[in-house]
DNA sequence: TCGATATCGAGACTCAGGCTCATGACCGCC
DNA sequence: GGCGGTCATGAGCCTGAGTCTCGATATCGA
């Protein structure tokens, strides 16, 4: 059972229909590299309407299949998500994006909650830098 | 010497002119609460052009006077910045925004760098939750 | 197979923000 | 205190991401 099959079962389980456009978009997103803009998907899926691309991206976010990343310049990218909670590390030079997780970060959140009395419901943590390969190339 | 005076000196020192619109916007931003949208500033500064508001917000960001915050829904807010490095904690119910800093968070960044070989140049960390007052009110 | 309804697509629309360029305001210099 | 070279301004136009509308179509349980 492929990853696409799992996703299709998730749709069905939640009462969503398994449509041609949705299948097509899942395939297309697999071909677009480690992250992509909404309009990259539009361009790579001729025959699927723009509105449907945006609707589907939002739906897949809710299902945890896709995640949204704010790039350094403030623009938005999308990315196929791993199952676990994670954050994003991006190379500002070559654009590579990778996921990471950190127990220490979750501890920071707990500490902020303790100090402020807030109940924490969500957070956003993106890290921008230069990957090892780009550092070597630029040296 | 007021905070506005300090800012005006910073402008001068960097070779920027001290213009009427810039003074007016600094005053206006002091009246807008703990964060505001660009168009809140536009609305509160009649006589100052829209383009000038956006230009000035960007300039003040570069000078470290104003910082930009991504809200939970993805929209952008601005806020007068304290001098030190900090992050943002927002109540999703009443909208309160406060700053915090965390040595542990900076340690997380160092650890990510060590693990991945990246040189880290910037990061974005926003925390969304419910403040103590809103929790009490909603209980 | 059939009907209820979820979904689609074309195209208009919104909203933040940037660009252009002619006009006006600063400010260092004399 | 004036001058002039720039820096800054603002009206209006433009862009690009994302949303909305609504008539047409596809999905899927009964
Ligand atoms: Mn992700
Ligand atoms: Mn801030
Ligand atoms: Zn790189
Ligand atoms: Zn609150």
Image: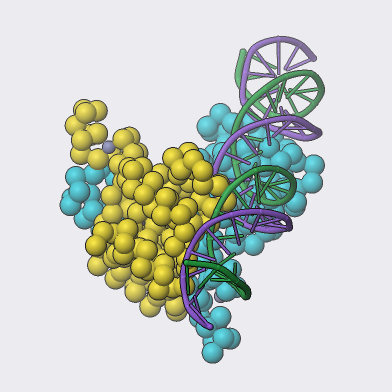
Chain colours: A cyan, B yellow, C purple, D green
Query: How many discs appear?
Result: 0
Q: Is residue B37 visible?
A: no
Residue A112 x/y as whole percent: 23, 53
At horizontal 35% and vertical 54% (from top left) the residue drawn is B80
Q: Is residue A31 above or below residue D25?
A: below
Q: Which of A57 and B64 is in front in this view?
A: B64
Q: A53 or B10: nearer the eye?
A: B10
Taking the spot 48% from the left edge, 46% from the top edge, the residue there is: B38
Query: x and y percent of residue C22 in the render?
Result: 72, 55
Left or right position of A6 against B134:
right
Point out residue D15 in the picture as x, y percentages from the top left corner: 71, 51
Front residue of B29/B38: it is: B29
- Identify the residue at horizontal 72%, vertical 48% (top origin): A42
User: In this image, B86 relative to C10: left or right?
Assistant: left
Q: Position of residue A46 (x, y in %)?
A: 79, 46
Asked whether the viewer can see residue B95, the reply is yes
Image quadrant where one finds the N terminus of chain B: bottom left
- In the shown orientation, is residue B101 left or right of residue A128? left
Question: Does residue B8 appear to the left or right of B37 in the view shown?
Answer: left
Identify whether B64 is placed above or below C5.
below
Q: Identify which residue is drawn at 41% across, 67% down.
A: B11
Query: Looking at the figure, which quarter contains the C terminus of chain B?
Result: top left
């Amino acid at each position: 059972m492929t990853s696409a099959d799992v996703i299709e079962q998730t749709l069905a389980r939640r009462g969503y229909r398994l449509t041609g456009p949705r299948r097509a978009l899942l395939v297309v997103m697999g071909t677009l590299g480690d992250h992509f803009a909404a309009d990259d998907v539009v361009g790579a899926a001729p025959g699927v309407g723009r509105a449907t691309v945006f609707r589907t991206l939002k739906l897949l976010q809710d299902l945890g299949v896709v995640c949204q990343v704010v790039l350094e310049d403030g623009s938005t990218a999308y990315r196929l998500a791993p199952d676990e909670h994670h954050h994003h590390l991006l190379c500002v030079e070559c654009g590579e994006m990778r996921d990471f997780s950190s127990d220490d970060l979750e501890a920071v959140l707990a500490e902020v909650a303790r100090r402020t009395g807030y109940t924490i419901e969500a957070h956003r943590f993106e890290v921008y830098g230069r990957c090892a390969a780009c550092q070597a190339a630029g040296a």
